[in-house]
Amino acid sequence: MERKQQLLERIAAREARVGIVGLGYVGLPLAVAFAQEGFHVLGVDVDATKVAALQRGESYVEDVPAAVLEPLVSAGLLRASTDYAILADADAISICVPTPLRKTKDPDISFIVDSTECIATYMPPGRGQLIVLESTTYPGTTDEIILPRLSRDGLEVGHDFFLAFSPERIDPGRTDYTVRTTPKVIGGTTPDCLELAVALYSTVVDHPVPVSSTATAEMVKLLENTFRAVNIGLVNEVALMCDRLGLSVWEVVGAAATKPYGFMPFYPGPGLGGHCIPIDPHYLSWKLRTLNYTARFIELAAEVNSHMPDYVVGKVGDALNSERKAVNGSRVLVLGVAYKRDVGDVRESPALDVIHLLRERGAEVSYHDPHVPAVRFDGYALTSVELTDAALEEADCVVIVTDHRAFDWERIKQRAHLIVDTRNAIKSNGGAKVVRL
Ligand SMILES: NC(=O)c1ccc[n+]([C@@H]2O[C@H](COP(=O)([O-])OP(=O)(O)OC[C@H]3O[C@@H](n4cnc5c(N)ncnc54)[C@H](O)[C@@H]3O)[C@@H](O)[C@H]2O)c1
């Protein structure tokens, strides 16, 4: 029987073994989804701490409750290792490794290269493994970077192995859409590669969305994230304009959002954060630079968005000034350091820039975040202070950077004297003087 047919039957019978490389925010929920569907999942991560936690059935990703994970581990459906050799048993492998930027803002695809080379080392030639890249990356990566590394020793794609790209759309903290209910875009290197990848993901996703090539699927993901980065950049600039005009950007966006068609609201904030929106568009602009094209919207949005922490610190300075106080020597309490509501992820969080900039100006900065007990960055090592009435009362200025649902806004407003609110979290009047973005 030809290899494709064999794999299709193993997938349909849930006999296929599914490898997941990179067990982070993307890889772990995917591993759980396949294990819940009855597949034997083989997870590989270079981080021995994560692997040890998984072996004990403990979760380190907020969206994956231990109560869901532990039974899958106990039942032997989900195994984790730091050793790529376990992937020699896999029929399909999804790669979910990081794709950060270098300091120069060029793509760092070294994690993709390293993991591909390890997969190639253990790839059984006769198996017809399906390899799917999920990491966000520039158009061309799958066929230009992964394909040649798997094709060495004369192995042929579509015959000896199959290759596809399927971008992850996970939105940490979101509960209304799950792995299963979020449509998933898939592009294959050959039509058989696509057919197999669609068959595999159809077991855990209700709506697979096949597209004509891996590069198209790569570009789809970058369009989605660039769309967000550019629209956030636009509304952040509108916030700066409203400030000059003496208008409330929140009122303007809120009223515009009543238009039932042709308008989608985006909201201003202290700057972009997380592993995706501040980073992914740079993958696209880098690729275009190699083709002598400047991605103007991306560059402009990045300029506006990266200025926002400075703008927030300027607002803090103005607010303190109105109270006859200087930033230098003032006690500033930052509420929320995670990059967005209800998550504990501080990667690229604008709160870190705000803290750094305030400290540079001589402020005594502390923070409280119910999701982030401690944070280390740029030589700082800070721990979350308790959000007591005294902590709120003693602060010269409270800066709301992340509007976690756990915050009691009414108490914060009653106890604090002066609040800079970058999220429009404080809705009513009374209590502290509130300066909004
Ligand atoms: N986090 C999100 O919300 C999100 C959403 C959509 C897409 N993505 C994309 O998915 C990819 C993964 O992101 P993430 O947030 O899961 O990252 P993450 O850092 O949470 O997880 C990546 C994991 O890969 C491991 N790893 C690194 N190098 C490895 C190697 N050579 N072999 C095996 N494991 C290795 C790391 O130890 C880590 O556990 C990125 O490309 C990201 O842009 C992320």
Image (spheres, rainbow, N blue to C red):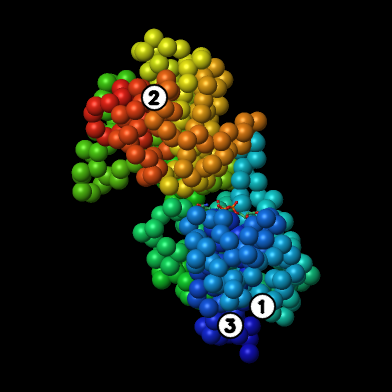
Q: Secondary structure at mark 3?
A: loop
Name above or below for residue 139 compared with residue 246: below
Residue 199: horizontal and vertical position, in percent? Answer: 50, 76
Residue 66: horizontal and vertical position, in percent? Answer: 52, 63
Q: What distance separates the C-alpha of mark 1 from that of mark 2?
A: 65 Å
Q: Is residue 167 or residue 72 the one in the foreground?
A: 72
Residue 158 visible from this viewpoint = no
Q: What distance separates the C-alpha of mark 3 from that of mark 1?
A: 15 Å
Which residue bears the numbered disc 3?
15
How dense is the environment of label 3, judged by Cα within 10 Å: few (below 14), some, or many (20 and up)? some
Taking 361 as reference, is 162 left or right? right
Which residue bears the numbered disc 1?
128
Taking 130 as reference, is 297 left or right? left
Which residue bears the numbered disc 2?
393
Tell me the residue at 58%/33% (across/down): 382
Name above or below for residue 364 compared with residue 182: above
Q: What distance separates the C-alpha of mark 3 from that of mark 2?
A: 61 Å
